[in-house]
């Protein structure tokens, strides 16, 4: 990525954080005219770009390039925390929104919550050591992301499964909408071929995570929109999902006999 694009991304990051050139200059220990000249000339040492990234809490690779599209390895929350979230579904839904970069005021507006309502929810999350609560409902998430939710009977497995089923049904039912995309395919193939496709899907998922992380770090909220991609793949047992009964019931023996006679003739 050229430095021109790098400085363009830095400008977006400043705007997203409501920072001015003066704020950046103060954080870097430089004069405001010096910082403005950096952006006009769009030329500086790599070390200076790294310093700017540190101030903005952005990885230099997110400014200078894709960095090989490497994402953090998902890790689970403590089991006791998952159990508490499973007992309080609204709290879990709230946490999912916070993880998707919604702020408290956005959530209050969407769900018609009062300031006290929001504070109570955030306090519970703070007691679970999932965030640090600041002034005026500001917060900082304190757990590792992305999260690996426990499967196979994990406390939140049923809730997450139902959320995904509801989402999939909504897309299928409204697949003609401009931004909705639905496709499915089933084919007979070798297990080795399916393994190749699964590896390619994993690579695509890593790319999706990385590009989304960069967008959230760099661009202002008004340019961001929540999207969800749901992939499901694996061997399919058609008898498990379908039923083909005998064409004639036990009560219709006459029709059965006629069919046998017709075959013999």
Image: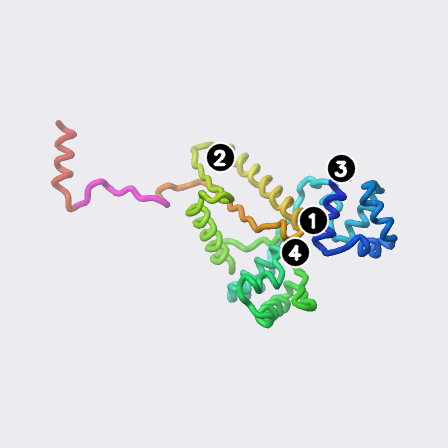
Between circles 3 and 2, the one closer to the viewer is 3
Q: Which residue is mark 2?
A: 191
Residue 150 point in image, percent of width and height: 54, 55
Q: Are marks 3 and 2 in contact (CB under 8 Å)?
A: no
Number of other residues with Cα within 10 Å of mark 4, as a class: few under 14, some 14 to 19, many 20 or more: some
Residue 249 covered by magenta stretch: yes
**Cα distance in 3D space between marks 3 and 4:** 32 Å
Secondary element at tag 1: helix
Q: Main secondary structure of the magenta part?
A: loop
Q: Earlier in the sequence, mark 3 or mark 2?
A: 3
Number of other residues with Cα within 10 Å of mark 3, as a class: few under 14, some 14 to 19, many 20 or more: few
**Cα distance in 3D space between marks 2 and 4:** 34 Å
Going 69% across and 41% down the picture, which residue do you hit? 66
Extreme residue in the top direction: 265
The residue lying toward the viewer, choosing from 38 and 133, is 38
Look at the image and tell me in which quarter the C terminus lies. top left
Q: Earlier in the sequence, mark 3 or mark 4?
A: 3
**Cα distance in 3D space between marks 3 and 2:** 43 Å
Q: Earlier in the sequence, mark 2 or mark 1?
A: 2
Secondary element at tag 4: loop
Q: Which residue is mark 3?
A: 2
Q: Which residue is mark 4?
A: 144
Image-based side of 239 in relation to 66, left or right:
left
Point out the stretch of residues depicted in magenta.
241-250
Between circles 2 and 1, the one closer to the viewer is 1
Going 81% across and 50% down the picture, which residue do you hit? 51
**Cα distance in 3D space between marks 1 and 3:** 16 Å
Q: Which residue is mark 1?
A: 218
Residue 5 point in image, percent of width and height: 73, 40
On screen, residue 69 above or below 141: above
Image-based side of 218 in relation to 107, left or right:
right
């Amino acid at each position: 990525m050229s430095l021109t694009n790098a400085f363009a991304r830095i400008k977006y990051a400043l705007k997203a954080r409501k920072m001015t050139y003066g704020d950046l200059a103060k954080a870097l220990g430089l004069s405001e005219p010096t910082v403005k000249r950096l952006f006009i000339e769009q030329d500086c040492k790599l070390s200076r770009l790294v310093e700017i990234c540190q101030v903005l809490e952005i990885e230099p690779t997110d400014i200078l390039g894709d960095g090989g599209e490497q994402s953090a390895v998902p890790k689970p929350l403590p089991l006791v925390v998952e159990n508490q979230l499973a007992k309080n579904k609204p709290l879990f839904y709230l946490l999912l929104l916070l993880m998707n970069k919604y702020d408290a005021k956005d959530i209050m507006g969407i769900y018609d919550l009062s300031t006290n309502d929001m504070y109570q929810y955030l306090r519970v999350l703070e007691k679970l050591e999932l965030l640090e609560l600041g002034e005026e409902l500001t917060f900082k998430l304190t757990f590792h992301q992305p999260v690996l939710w426990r499967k196979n009977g994990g406390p939140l497995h049923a809730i997450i499964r139902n959320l995904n089923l509801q989402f999939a049904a909504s897309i299928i039912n409204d697949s003609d909408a401009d931004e909705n995309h639905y496709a499915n395919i089933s084919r007979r193939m070798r297990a080795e071929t399916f393994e190749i496709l699964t590896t390619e899907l994993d690579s695509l998922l890593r790319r999706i995570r990385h590009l989304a992380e960069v967008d959230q770090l760099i661009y202002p909220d008004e340019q961001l929109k929540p999207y969800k991609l749901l992939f499901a793949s694996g061997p399919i047992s058609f008898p498990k999902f379908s039923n083909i009964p005998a064409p004639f019931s036990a009560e219709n023996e006459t029709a059965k006999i006629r069919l046998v006679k017709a075959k013999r003739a």
